[in-house]
Amino acid sequence: MPHVRILIRPKAGILDPQGTAVEQALPQLGFEGVSDVRIGRLVELDAADASEVAAICDKLLANPLIEDYEIQVDGAPAS
Amino acid sequence: MRIGVPQFPGSCDEVDALLAAGHVGDAELLWHRDRDLKGVDAIVVPGGFSYGDYLRAGAIAGLSPVMDAIADFARDGGPVLGICNGFQVLCAAGLLPGALLQNQDRRFVLRQVELSVETTDTDWTSAAEPGQLLSIPAKHQSGRWWAPSELHAEIADQDQIVFKYAAGGNFNGSLDDVAGVCNEGRNVVGLMPHPEHAVDALTGSTDGLVLFRSLLEGATNV
C-alpha cells in the first residue's frame, strides 16, 4: 500500500506565533542567524488509493484558506 | 421558542448555553452523533474543546452528524449562533467566512472585553442598537480571526462583520479587530467572546442577553 507523507504549512504571510516563539528562543541558546521559522504539521498514512489524498487534505487534514499542503507518495512528490 | 445546543466530546460551555437560551425559551441538548435536531427553532453551538481540538480547532466537530443536520438547518435560514469553539466549528464547516488562528501572543487569555455591535441586521443582533458596546468575557487561545484580503474586503462590503473588539481591545491580533461575523443569509453568526456567560447580574454583566432577545424579536416578526 502506498505510503503517503503530507506536509502542511501555514500560508506565506500569515503570522505563525509558534514559529516566532522558536525563532526568539534560539539566540538564547547561542544559535544566531536563524530567521523565518515556520511550524507546520507532518501527517503520514498508508492509502489504498493515493489519488484520494488531495481530497482528504482539502476536506479534513488542511484548511486551504490558511494552509498549503504538499503530498509525497513513497518518497516522491505527487504529480 | 425552542433552542438546541449540540454537545461534542470536549464541549464545556453547553450548560451555560442552555441556561442563557433558557432566558428566552426552552433549551435542549443535542448529541453530536444524532442527526435529529428535534424540531428546534434555533441552534447555539457552544464553546469548549470539541474532539480535543485535534488537528485544528473545530475541524473534526465540523464533520459530525449533528453538524450535517445543522448545515441543512442553516441553509434553510434557521438561526445558528456559534460561540468560541462553536465559532471555530462553524468556520471549519464552511458556514461562516474566515478562520480562527492561534492568538498572536500564543497565550490563553481570559478577560472581560468590550465588543461593538457593527450590524443589527442579523438574526442574533436585531435587538441591539447599532454601535452598542457589550461587556462580555472572552476566554480562548485560538481566536485570531483571519481571512485573505479579498474575502475580508468582500465580507466588510456585505456588512457581514457583526462584532469588533472596541478600540484598543483587540488582544488576540484579529484582522480588522473582528470578533464576530455572519453568513450571507445573516442567520448564522459566530463570535469568540461568550455572551452566554453574561446573562446574570451576579456574574457582572447581562449584556450577552441581547443576542438571545434578538432571536425572540425575529420570531415575533415572522
Image (cartoon, coloured by chain):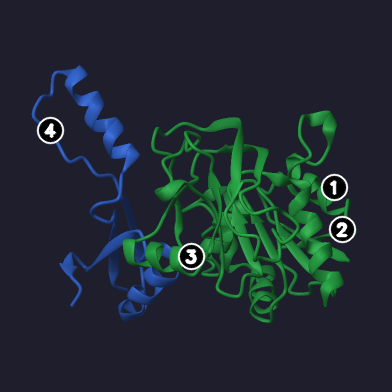
Q: CA distance from mark 2 to mark 4?
A: 54 Å
Disc ID at residue B27: 2
Q: Amino acid at mark 4?
A: Val
Q: Chain of mark 3?
A: B
* Chain B rendering hue: green
Disc ID at residue B19: 1
Quarter of the view holding residue B2: bottom right
Judge if badges 4 and 1 mark residues of a common chain: no
Mark 2 or 4: in front is 2
Q: Amino acid at mark 2?
A: Ala
| Residue found 25% across the figure and 24% down from its top | A25
Q: Is residue A24 left or right of residue B182?
A: left
Near mark 1 (Cα within 10 A), the count class, few <14, some 14-19 or many ≥20, is some
Q: Which residue in the structure is indicated by mark 4?
A: A34
Q: Position of residue B36 (x, y in %)?
A: 79, 74
Mark 4 or 1: in front is 1
Judge if badges 2 and 1 mark residues of a common chain: yes
Q: Position of residue B215 (x, y in %)?
A: 79, 63
Q: CA distance from mark 3 to mark 4?
A: 35 Å
| Residue found 45% across the figure and 63% down from its top | B156
Q: Chain of mark 1?
A: B
Q: CA distance from mark 4 to mark 1?
A: 51 Å
Judge if badges 3 and 4 mark residues of a common chain: no
- Residue nearer the viewer, A69 or B18: B18
Q: Position of residue B179 (x, y in %)?
A: 53, 49
- Residue nearer the viewer, B159 or A35: B159
* Chain A rendering hue: blue
Quarter of the view holding residue B208: top right
Q: Which residue in the structure is indicated by mark 3?
A: B97
| Residue found 39% across the figure and 71% down from its top | A58
Under tag 4, what secondary structure? Answer: loop
